Amino acid sequence: MSTFPHFGTAAIHVGQEPEQWDMNQVVPPISMSSTYKQDNPGEPKGHDYSRAGNPTRDVLQKNLAALEDAKHCQVFSSGLAATSAIINLLKTGDHIVCSDDVYGGTQRYIRRVAVPNHGLEVDSVDLTDVKNLETAIKPNTKMVWFESPSNPLLKVVDIAAIVQVAKKANPEIVVVVDNTFMSPYFQRPISLGADVVVHSITKYINGHSDVVMGAVITDNDEFQQHLFFMQLG
């Protein structure tokens, strides 16, 4: 989380402190190495293999976590890769309540991959009416997934109300909010009670159509360890 009073200040400073680099670079250096020397076997100095992380990625992850007022961020090669990592929190037989209007790639992944290949169940529900969630939750519901505003119809969902209903039904239900359209500048779902926030960095966070990347942000230490493991394999 950021200690800076203003969003813009945090955006240009968090994770980018020059003092962390040997030469006090004011622009974070790009780390190109895939592996890192260990003084002794099994004793890496922060990093051992770049798939699991490197100093450059650390900068971005610290920054995005701070902008969302959260503890942890893991970045992925795309928004859909981030989605896949979150869905892998679930087990065969688990049920997802998914908003009836979500990004097409998310919808296809859940219905054409997660359901038939991993044995998950999913129901698509209009979550603009919180009562629809109350009736959609089942004993095996483990996740609620939605966007607000949604892509493409710009449906607005009351995040705090959805969290309240989900947690009342079962405190272990994971509430996931895709915050791509609003970005952390306008909305921070973690502060409204969401467990996980996902971004397609490709879109508004990057803003220049020259990056394909995704991010998962959470306050939950256990989720963060799962996401890190998904990156490392």
Image: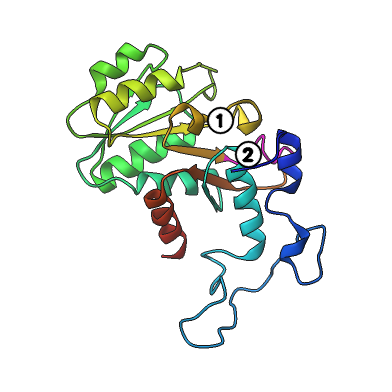
**Quarter of the image where one finds residue 32:** bottom right
Task: Please name the residue shown 60% across and 51% down the image.
Answer: 61
Give percent across and percent down for residue 43. 49, 81
* Above or below for 105 versus 133: below
Residue underneath mark 1: 188
Label 2 belongs to which residue? 67
Q: Secondary structure at mark 1?
A: loop
| Residue neighbourhood size for the residue with mark 1, other residues' Cα within 10 Å, grouped as few (<14), some (14–19), many (≥20) | some
Residues 51 and 224: in front is 224
Q: Residue at (47%, 43%) from the top-left corner?
A: 218
Viewer-proximal residue among 78 and 232? 232
Q: Check whether the beta carbons of the residues at disc 2 and disc 1 lie within 8 A of each other.
A: yes
Q: Check if residue 211 falls in the magenta segment.
A: no
Can you say whether 172 is above or below 227 in the image? above
Give left or right: position of 31 versus 129.
right
Q: Which residues are magenta?
A: 200-208
As helix, strand or loop, the secondary structure at mark 2 comes to: helix
Q: Is residue 193 above or below residue 198?
A: above
In the image, what residue type sits under mark 1? Arg
Disc on the earlier residue, 2 or 1: 2
Residue drawn at point x = 76 percent, y = 72 percent: 22
Residue 106 x, y percent position in the rendering = 45, 36
Q: Amino acid at mark 2?
A: Leu
Front-most of 182 and 18?
18
Q: Is residue 29 visible?
A: no
Residue 35 visible, this orientation: yes
Residue 122 badge:
none
The N terminus lies in quadrant: top right
